[in-house]
Image (tube, rainbow, N blue to C red):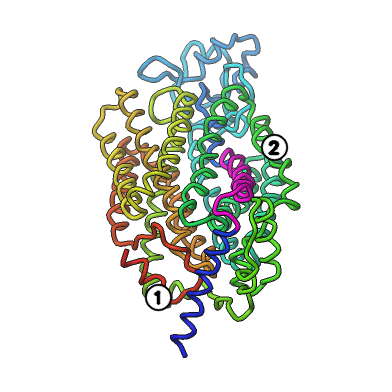
Amino acid sequence: MLHSSLATEVVTMVEFGDLIRAVGEFGLYQKLVVLWISLPMLLNILQIVSQEFMVVDVPHYCNTDWIRAVGPNLTEEEQLNLTLPRDANGDYEQCIMYSPVEWDLDSIVAYGLNATEKCSNGWVYPTAQPPSLLTEFDLVCDRKDLSDVSQSIYMVGLLIGAIICGPLSDRIGRRPVLLISIYGHCLFSLAIAFLPNFTLYIIFRCIMATAASGILITTVPLATEWVGVSYRPIAVVVSQCCFAVALMILAGLSYGIRNWRLLEIAGSAPMFALFFYYWVLPESARWLVTKGKIEEAKKYLKKAASINKRTIPPELLDQLKGETQTKSGSILDLLRKKHLLRMTLIMMCAWFMDSLVYYGLSLNVTGFGLDIYLTQLAFGAVELPGRLSCIYLLQWFGRKKVQAVLLLLAGLMCLITVGIPEDQAVAITILAVIGKFASCASFSTSYIYAAELFPTVIRQSGMGLCSMAARVAGIIAPLILILQDIHSAIPMAVFGGASVLGGLLCFLLPETRGVELPDDTVTDKQQNISKL
């Protein structure tokens, strides 16, 4: 009886693959689906790294207007000479001032000031420039680490989104979760541009990140569940090429728009154009079948066939009946069943290492010694071939080898930079760009690989767990960058070592190249995969 049940579930999977082939494995309808999921991802990535261009370091020094009470006619240069100490290079100290005294001006000029203290009345930014996060909220000196802390809290939002949106998408569907995430991202990203203080800025970015996470992890299953076996890498990679395009757009936007509020508006306002998604975004027909919503699945399949100018044989549609639906699954299946548990733990580790090295490089755009806008442009430009190459690499070498080798390459590039002298900015940047190439390609591979490994009934839950691991790494990455204050080599050594470890673990994963998506959590399908 158990054998008969398993056989029925395998037939269901094969029948749905036949339906996709009848509809068209990558026709106009699927291309439109890829387009619909690509646009929010393009606008989404702008928010993840845009803060790096809002806190670019500028000259600053302590506000010493206290001396104006006794010397109102002092020139600016005279005021600075009397109230600010100089460093070893003869420049004014940026974070220290002479302690205020209750002397008259003649005494201050005659005897000078000796006692120093940290800036107690804010900072002055002498060069004329549009407001940035750094200048408006004084993210300098003892407050400079607040920028990295803000990025970590943003990653906490991504983690919360992964926890919520993964299981929710398996329960109520891909479409409603994606729509809610898009609309939530619209509202909170635009609201950020009008916030009066840095605390509210951090809170709103955390909420926005929760919505952003819903977009990131919902789009991939929606793409893979609508296309044929051989087109899965194309569907996912093409949509993720928007990351590269977004990074290059960000380099131009941030170069031309130095006012952080206007930059925030420019990066978020276009998201409002996606409100029409309510009428055009489809649900995953494969997910509908696993939930027993056969008639609704047929409606989407017929629409897809019509747009692709194909005809579905009536006998195939007739096989989609209630008794052929697969049993439901839960996130606990990933923990209870050994083959799923091992796969999940290794995949979570791969995502963790991917995220750590990817964000470690992306958020350190100011740390390689060259112009940050050119570095950002190079980082964006290298992502295009990095992600597009996955289409061919995954077809030629399979998922397992590509995932492992790319992580190893990214890690080695980071480790090599540790031994390069700091004054060799060009060499360090070139190695970082190669590392970025490997890390973004590895990240794209992770999305495809995870979507193929996890069964349909818990695909979003599984990818949610992987995304959680990635978001934990995203939280840690900005904090690791703070360690460069101890030694500049520490962050890159950590990123490199972790990535190499992740690459080695990936050799333990099963291969999924050319295998139909699993729909249920029984072991037969996974055992077939592992034999390939």
The kind of secondary structure element at disc 2 is helix
Please say whether residue 157 is visible from this viewpoint.
no
**Number of marks in picture:** 2
Location of mark 2 (residue):
270
Circle 2 Cα neighbour tier, 10 Å, few/some/many (<14 / 14–19 / ≥20): some
Q: Is residue 386 left or right of residue 35?
A: left
The kind of secondary structure element at disc 1 is helix
Name the spot of residue 310 as percent of width and height, x first: 64, 54
* Mark 2 residue type: Pro
| Residue at x 72%, y 37% (from the top left corner) | 194
* Mark 1 residue type: Asp
Q: Is residue 32 magenta?
A: yes
Q: Is residue 50 magenta?
A: no
| Residue at x 53%, y 73% (from the top left corner) | 12
Figure quadrant of residue 288? bottom right
Location of mark 1 (residue):
524
Per the rendered image, the range of residues in magenta is 23-46
Name the spot of residue 433 as percent of width and height, x first: 38, 32
